[in-house]
Amino acid sequence: MTSETLLLENAILAAWQQNAQPWTQAVREQRIESRRLVTDRAVVEAVMACAPKRVIDIGCGEGWLARVLTAQGVEVIGVDAVADLIETARAQGGGRFEHLSYAQLAAGMLGERGDVVVCNFSLLGKQSVEHLLAAVPGLLNHSGVLVVQTLHPMMACGDQPYRDGWREGSWAGCGEGFNTPAPWYFRTLGGWLDTFTACGLRLIRIDEPLHPDSGRPASVLFVLVPAHSV
């Protein structure tokens, strides 16, 4: 990992640590329109379609998804690298919550497996994401599935060139109280597919949940299995 990439990866975590409280408020007050109208429901439906008994929610934040899944009879282990978010999630209950970095997860420190591993808008870096994705097969039970929801590349590209690379972040649409946003690593659709393949994962489904007003994709949702699975 180059020094520049390391700085950017560290800046992601620092920004989320700094903005944990306003993010929690934004989620609880349902300030983010695309989440309220489309993407929250989309990820819940994608996970529940797999009929899981246990789910590992990576980048669980303040735990909203864990609580929704637990209410539907699923055992959930939520994991996040931001201590304040994990403390908030534990205070609300609705799952078991562990404070682990993606590097620690990739190193096997969780010591658990699930029927579904879900990453809901939580894959923001480059090498950190690649190392985590390569470790996902070790977090899945037999016939387990990875569900990833992220920004749709065509919608998130904006006016910049459509190629993989680091981008400046933004808290636009999240309300007030936020400080410096986290940088993030933009991947084209092909970039995502190449990353999944390089990390030993095989795509079995792709969905593009649509915003009800604009008719444009609000996100892209990937369902994957380990490449060695039948």
Image (cartoon, rainbow, N blue to C red):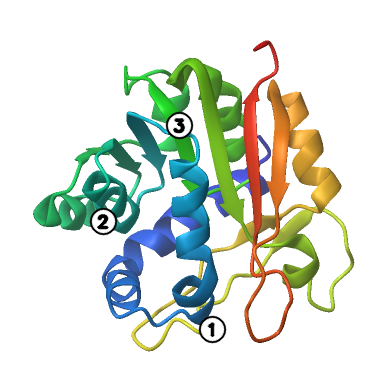
Which residue matches tag 3? 116
Q: Earlier in the sequence, mark 1 or mark 2?
A: 2
Q: Earlier in the sequence, mark 3 or mark 2?
A: 2
Neighbour tally class for label 2: few under 14, some 14-19, many 20 plus, Cα within 10 Å: many
Which residue matches tag 2? 85
SS for dot 3: strand
| Labelled disc at residue 18 | none
Give the label, 3 or 2, closer to the camera: 3
Q: CA distance from mark 1 to mark 3?
A: 31 Å
Q: CA distance from mark 1 to mark 2?
A: 20 Å
Is residue 61 visible to us here? no
Q: Which image quarter holds the C terminus?
A: top right
Left/right placement of residue 42 relative to residue 16 reads right
Badge 3 amino acid: Val
Which residue corresponds to the image point at 29% horizontal and 69% vertical from the top-left?
Answer: 24
Which residue corresponds to the image point at 59% horizontal and 30% vertical from the top-left?
Answer: 133
Left/right placement of residue 80 relative to residue 185 reads left
Residue 50 x %, y %: 49, 34
Badge 1 amino acid: Ala
SS for dot 1: loop
| Labelled disc at residue 172 | 1
Quadrant in the picture for residue 126: top right
Give the label, 1 or 3, closer to the camera: 3
Q: Which image quarter holds the N terminus?
A: top right
Q: CA distance from mark 3 to mark 2?
A: 22 Å
